[in-house]
Image: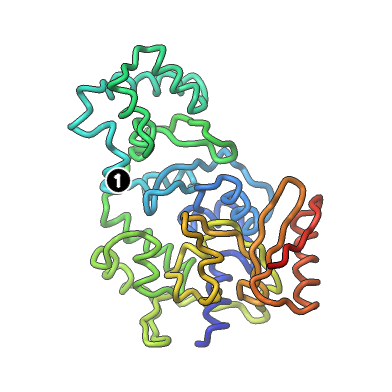
Amino acid sequence: MDQTELTLRRLHNQFLVAAGSADEGVCGLIGLQAQHGAAALHALAIRSRGEIDYAAFVKTWSFRGTLHLHRKADLPLVLYHGSETDYGQIALSKEYAASVRSGYFREIVLGLLARGDCTREQLKEAFSSSGMTEQESPVILHSKGGLLRAMAEHGEIAYVADRNLIFTKLESMERMEQQPALAELVRRYISHYGPVSMRDAQTFFGLPQKLLKAHLEAALERFSYQGQTYFAAGSVVPNGVTMPKVLFLAAFDQMLLGYQKTQNSILPQEHLKTIYSDNGIIMPTVLVDGKVRAVWRREHDTIELYPIFTLAARERSEICKAAEELFSNAALRWIEA
């Protein structure tokens, strides 16, 4: 095992060498980070072949307490009992539930969404018109998500996948218990992020190692690399499959969130602060031959490219060619440091 093989196996398992269906990609990767909705859709598109049925997916809070795009069919798994966050449950906590009439406003939400999807603003207006008091408002509409987030963490409501801040009512579900859920989640993680280390898994799930250890050790393959133990599903990259020349990864892409950043084989360690900003943003990146060589962003109809390194003429040409294929109607602009 060398760094190139490690990277290629990860890219292949993440559907970035050979695309799968949208359903396979979101299922295998256990969701896509959706803090920025457009980034999640880009991450899905570059991993998918064929048409995408967005009605099969929703956005909700899951790993590390952040928004992810998930298959509806996976919600009982990713929203297992015990996955709720303390700050996400403020509006339903014993401290506030009675005094702020959380149950009353919860029924209003369910009643409105039973008749059709609603924007967050429409639900807030319904709260106000139903007599929400000045005492209740800071809890029901808490900046960490309030009542709507609390209901989402229980699997009652979620955001629709392809539009911003529009809630939909979910079908009744039986959420899984923690241990069988973690067994399946770690199995998918090893299969589609592997090879991975214990520290990688801890980073991805945001959980203590003691909860993950036994599930990781059930992996089919285990080996040592650069002083650490890595776990994998025993899969190999098919013969003839080579490293992609260029990949435009999304902001908050799973290739950047799935691993401990100081040991991620695609990252230039000397430029981590360019990719991971101080305010928590993870930039969209351009991989050339399996290494991050630039960051990018879309400004209306223009793709702006910011090189991290001095790029050879061949690299610039390959980046431009890939950009033209992926963003067919957008102009390209290089922004030099």
Left or right, 219 with reference to 162: left
Helix, strand or loop status at disc 1: loop
Q: In x, y percent, where is residue 176?
A: 30, 47
Q: For this rendering, which residue is in front, 75 or 280?
A: 280
Q: For this rendering, which residue is in front, 84 or 144?
A: 144
Query: Looking at the image, is 312 positioned above or below residue 157?
Result: below
The residue pinned by badge 1 equals 85
Identify the residue at horizontal 37%, vertical 87% (top origin). Answer: 227
Identify the residue at horizontal 59%, vertical 40% (top origin). Answer: 162
Q: In which image quadrant can residue 190 be found?
A: bottom left
How crowded pointer 1 is (Cα within 10 Å; few <14, some 14-19, many 20+) is rated as some
Query: Looking at the image, is 269 positioned above or below residue 212?
Result: below
Identify the residue at horizontal 25%, vertical 22% (top origin). Answer: 100
Residue most extreme to the left: 94
Q: In x, y percent, where is residue 56?
A: 54, 41
Identify the residue at horizontal 52%, vertical 27% (top origin). Answer: 119
Quarter of the rendering occupied by the C terminus? bottom right
Q: In which image quadrant can residue 49 be found?
A: bottom right
Q: How many marks?
A: 1
Left or right, 15 with reference to 204: right
Q: In which image quadrant can residue 153 be found?
A: top left
Q: For this rendering, which residue is in front, 97 or 159?
A: 97
Three-letter code for the amino acid on which mark 1 is drawn: Thr
